[in-house]
Image (tube, rainbow, N blue to C red):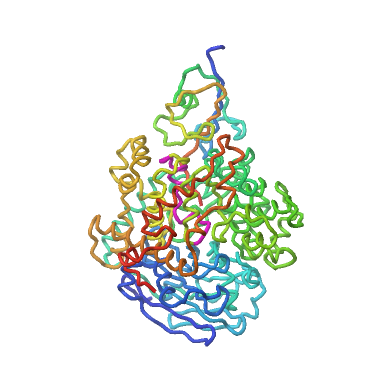
Amino acid sequence: MREVIGSNNRILEIDLSTKKFTVSEINKKDRNMYLGGKGMGLKLLYDRMEPGVDPLGEDNMIAFTMGVFMGSGAPCSGRFEAVTKSPLTGIMTCSSCGGPFGMALKTTGWDAMIIRGKASAPVYLAIDSKGVQFKPAKGIWGKDMNQAEAALLKEGAGALVIGQAGENLVRIANIRSGHRFVGRGGMGAVLGSKNVKGIVAKGGEIKIVPAKKEKFKKIVRRFNKYINNNPVTSGTYRSFGTNSATIACNTTGTIPVRNFTGGSHGEVHKISGETMAERFKTKWDTCKPCTIMCGHKGTIAGEERHIPEYETVHLLGSNLEIFDPVAVSDFNELCSKYGMDTISLGGILGWAMEATEKGLIKTSLKFGSTEGVADMIRDIALCRGIGKDLAQGSRLAAKKYGGEDFAMHVKGLELPGYEPRGAVGHGLGYATANRGGCHLSSYVISIEILFNMANPFTPKWKHYMVKFMENLFAAINSLHICQFTAYAVMFEPFLVKVSPFPLLKVLMGNMAPLAMNLMDVSLFPETWHAILGKHYIPYLGMLKFIKAGERVHVLERYMNTREGISKKDDTLPLRLLTEGRKCDAKEHTVPLEKMLKKYYKSRGYDENGIPKKRLLRRLGIKIQ
Amino acid sequence: MANEIAIRIKFFSGIDRELKLENYNHEQGLAMNVPAGKRLKWALRTAGMPAFSNHAYFRSGERISTRAKLRNGDEVTCLKPSGGG
């Protein structure tokens, strides 16, 4: 196996229409400015793709980008990024994914892969270090994800596949890499529109060696120590998975219930991480390499299955008032088979149940009942009956049938499993997230609820918290390392550790910029520098890292504004702005307008939410 | 007794197992009668919780500290810090 110091820096560009490929190099300046992963994916498409292309047309491109961390041995680094224009939202979408594909592609010798055009007949792509072979997908087109993946894995170490939903251009179709998914925004439909059933990478052709080996080893030891000391990354995630947050969120009224009307429910303990761990005898089944181990599998209905994640449990469970964990697992298995995003699907089913109740559509769906749900999931994946309309997403379905006020999406992307009226900063994060209703863009609920560091009902300083976290997570997703490592790193600095908790809380509530800048995240850029053999300057290196995150976030925003996004789209479903939750006697709503103005100002956007030229120039983004 | 109040503590995140509570039921939690005016810290110690435990406590949907004074009918949820997905 050939050893590569730092990074291979090679891009594989595939044109499906001509069945040709080219090889290019990652520009060093771009590497420094955009780091890799998400940042690099956006930059590559920004340079190559015109605004206004049809997401399901030949001119749309999809990029798969590995980060510098992948293959280096850094903890929790088995992740890659997919970037394209979303058929669900019509704007850019980026998705971070674990599973074996990223490692396979990187160790085949590619840091990035861009796919454009459309194959004349269904194909799958077989990648090795020399390039790509276009192979007919006759035997696997029409097959589900389990079958397609098993077939492709005979030819390589990692595969990406779409299911029937992707083939049928369902706008919430996803892409699978092992037990993980490129989940949000309908990227499976983008591959389907290009007649690509799957991609398999040979893997094991090169070995990445960090340039500063000794320094890197020391950093990894420190990283693992932080992760193993942290009660979340070493405790609850390992024991109960992502669903460990269920009880805390239910207690604070921040889970979606009955299409985002409830906030909490008395039966939620039946679908909690604790209950599932005990009932299904769960064990770890996680990405590689990983120190946190949040992924679990267990025995459900007599077979070994992946345990549904927090988001799946709440969108396909509590949001539909279904509290049977076996039923939730059944729905999850159907999604894994046909290839659909469980978050968007849950949002669509929630809308369909309420629309049925209000007489806008005719279905057998009913809140609290599992009857008809599995059939509807199949109908959506296969575009049958009303399933064909629901397959377009809740925004387009509501446009056709009515009920736009209770279609729970932002910019067309259905909301995840957190109720923002119980954590208003998280609500601002939904409104401003570049890809639409996304919890991972800023995840301010961790500050407001899970770590209890800020009053969840006040808008005070929430604009700053959202901005800081957006920049940090954009940078982390460009390295690329699991976002959950941020919990372990952020609370380790000496000043944070020795400060009494009430003092930190007062600081966060009254001087958020000071409190957030106490959270030393230098371990991330230090690792990046050690792998590439670059000199790391303490503190300045960290500021540069956060600025790179800001650049990535603002570039994505700028690309979206070229697609017509502005203030009118940075909003929330009417229900969250005007009605209280059933569990909340005070009937809190999200005071969005107040927070949004301050957010724009602190970001350097104009009053319409468009990045100012001055900001783009400061970040080195070429104005197009 | 008039100077006693009834409270209920619900343990999650495996804390009930660590405390070795026999026949513990997540729905019912642990029912306790405590002297009026006592703080949550007192009730937790009585339940067998070690001092300096790094847990989160909620009452009526709001986060409270172990120094919070208990009131009659309180239902306190006790869990370990957690992240979502």
Give the percent coordinates (x, y) of residue A591: 49, 45
- Is residue A445 found inside the magenta-colored segment of the image? yes
Give the percent coordinates (x, y) of residue B36: 50, 17
Name which residue lies at 67% across and 66% down: A381
Look at the picture and state if A298 lies above or below A205.
above
Name which residue lies at 49% across and 78% down: A115
Left/right placement of residue A280 relative to residue A3 reads right
Q: Quadrant of residue A58?
A: bottom right
Left/right placement of residue A216 relative to residue A290 reads left
Look at the picture and state if A315 lies above or below A56.
above
* Residue A400 can be seen in this image: yes
In-front residue for pair B6/A86: A86
Quadrant where the C terminus of chain A is found in the figure: bottom left
* Residue A149 can be seen in this image: no
Give the percent coordinates (x, y) of residue A306: 59, 56
Quadrant where the N terminus of chain A is found in the figure: bottom left
Give the percent coordinates (x, y) of residue A498: 30, 38
Left/right placement of residue A520 relative to residue A420 reads left
Question: Is the magenta region chiefly helix, strand or loop?
Answer: loop
Q: Which residue range is magenta in the image?
A: A435-454
